[in-house]
Image: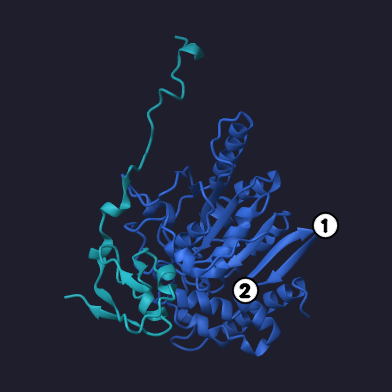
Chain colours: A cyan, B blue
Amino acid sequence: MSIKISEMAGWREIPVAGVAYRPSTESKTGDWRSFRPIVNEEKCTGCALCHFFCPDGAISLVNEKAKVDYDFCKGCGICAEECPVKAIEMVPER
Amino acid sequence: MGEEKLTLKDLAAKPDLLAPGHRMCAGCVSASVARMVMKATRGPTIVATATGCLEVATTILPYTAWRVPWIHNAFENVAATASGIESALKAMKRRGALKYEHVDIIAFGGDGGTYDIGFQALSGILERGHDLLYVLYDNEAYMNTGIQRSGGTPYCAWTTTSPAGKVIPGKPQWKKPIAHIVVEHRAAYVATASPAYPLDLIKKVRRGLEAEGPAFLHVIAPCTRGWRFPTNMGIKLARLAVQTCLFPLWEAWWEDGHPVYKLSGPSEAIARRPEMKKPVEEYLKPQGRFAHLFKPERKEELLRRIQEGIDREWSLLLKRAGFA
């Protein structure tokens, strides 16, 4: 049996493979956490370093102060370790 | 190079293009690197990612953490995939079918996907001169598959396929000088960066995107699981790598047929004041993958060889950069 090339499916007919279509923000990685970073707003200078270092994009600056999004913070502690004025403390989750 | 003034404050206000909720490990510095890289983009951007931690953990089907058009093809061909995107955009522009003046293209590869498996595709884009930025996030082994040694794994590092024992002291070979190999391809722009210096890293990404032709950024990305250190220590190690001159920061481009090497901030400071250079032990000691160098007894000979290797590479770089 011979198949003519012109009768074969073209790329338009091939099913699309592996399309990730839901935003990762639907999965709350905050439940991985065993230690919780607490920001001391009086000490925080708003330098933004923690925002850049955070692997999870879980720290933003709000009114020039670091604010942690606990929905996504995995509790790695990089922010507390790197804060130049020691304004972040890691406390155990209950 | 023309430069818009980039400041950390302004960049912090820019929304993340790699969204939270990705499944990279807690304390994964590769994720910090990817976030910083994306902060440097100028507008419409397309990202391609080789197989690796970053690819797998940011796109757990059906979820994706990428807020830009993103593609994964295979382990060995992220450079080829990205070059196809660049060529397609060029063709669309020629036909007037592209609604953007310019689109940034970034290819991410890990050390496995760059030093080893993707090397010929990388070499190909450099030779063909595609206008894109290749970012190597180097966690120095195949971490995603369980810590197997790669061409980027350093001398004496323990991995599951270079186990430290009586016969071998961890990996018996040295790290491949990948960034210098890329420079020798006559790449438009090459730089090394460390996430411990965010503004330096972001500026280099921007220069790489602005360069006309292939640009390559080699970023050190400490891995909490594979290097065996507590999750909060990644950035500190990325800084120590620079302070010990194990991973010096520099940029290189070509002018009148010659490579021009320029040391960046922290490494230039050490070049001017060599007493600032820290001994490599400070970098090795906190890492479990080097624990066999200190326990049960100190391996003086190996430590000496590692320090000598670093000193040798550092003095070679100083010569290239016009110091000494």
| Tag 1: amino acid | Gly
| Tag 2: amino acid | Pro
Image height of A13 relative to B57, above or below: above
Relative placement, left or right, of B202 versus B229 is right
Residue that carries the numbered disc 2 in the rendered image: B248
Relative placement, left or right, of B261 versus B58 is right
Residue that carries the numbered disc 1 in the rendered image: B257
Element under disc 1? loop
- Residue B261 location, quadrant: bottom right
Q: Position of residue A1 (x, y in %)?
A: 44, 9
Q: Position of residue B318 (x, y in %)?
A: 73, 76
User: Which chain does tag 2 point to?
Assistant: B
Q: Residue furthest right?
A: B256
Image height of A54 relative to B267, above or below: above
Relative placement, left or right, of B264 versus B18 is right
Image height of B130 relative to B292, above or below: above
Number of residues whose C-alpha sits closer than 10 Å to that of mark 2, classed few (under 14), some (14–19) or many (20 or more): many
Relative placement, left or right, of B159 versus B310 is left
Which of marks 2 and 1 precedes in the sequence? 2
Question: Who is closer to the viewer here, B281 or B257?
Answer: B257
